[in-house]
Amino acid sequence: MIRELVDYESSCDDLLSSIGSTTELRTVARYAHPWFGEMNAREWYALSGVHMGIHRVQIQRIIKGLVVK
């Protein structure tokens, strides 16, 4: 497997692990996202799935372009 894909999958595993060890995501603390405004931990976590999915598609397109035909 291509190193970048392994690194990507490892970062996804790290994210899932850190979320799994968090007891409460509906926090009072909020941090600003440049487009979506103030978000709590639960909202950031929900957005991370979409964000990581976009990167997965990008990586797959890059890999497809590298394949010699």
Image (cartoon, grey):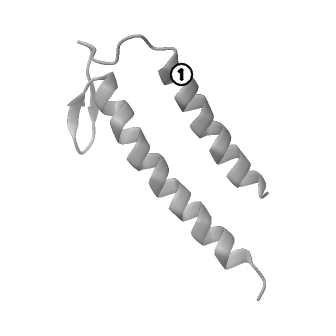
In the visual, does 22 lie left or right of 14?
Answer: left
Disc 1 packing (10 Å; few <14; some 14–19; many ≥20): few
In the visual, does 60 lie left or right of 31?
Answer: right
Relative to 58, residue 19 above or below: above
Which of the two residues, 20 or 54, is positioned nearer the viewer here?
A: 20
The quadrant of the rendering that contains the C terminus is bottom right
The amino acid marked with disc number 1 is Ser
Q: Find residue 34 and report its horizontal and vertical position in percent.
A: 27, 41
Q: Find residue 21 and report its horizontal and vertical position in percent.
A: 52, 14
Q: Find residue 52 and report its horizontal and vertical position in percent.
A: 48, 47
Residue sitting farthest toward the left? 37
Relative to 50, residue 22 above or below: above
Q: At 45% across and 56% down in the image, what residue appears?
A: 54
Q: Identify the image quadrant of residue 35.
A: top left
Which of the two residues, 34 or 39, is positioned nearer the viewer here?
A: 39
Q: At 35% across and 12% down in the image, what residue appears?
A: 24
Q: At 28% across and 14% down in the image, what residue appears?
A: 27
Describe the element under mark 1 as helix, strand or loop: helix
Q: Identify the image quadrant of residue 37.
A: top left
Quickly name the residue at label 1.
18
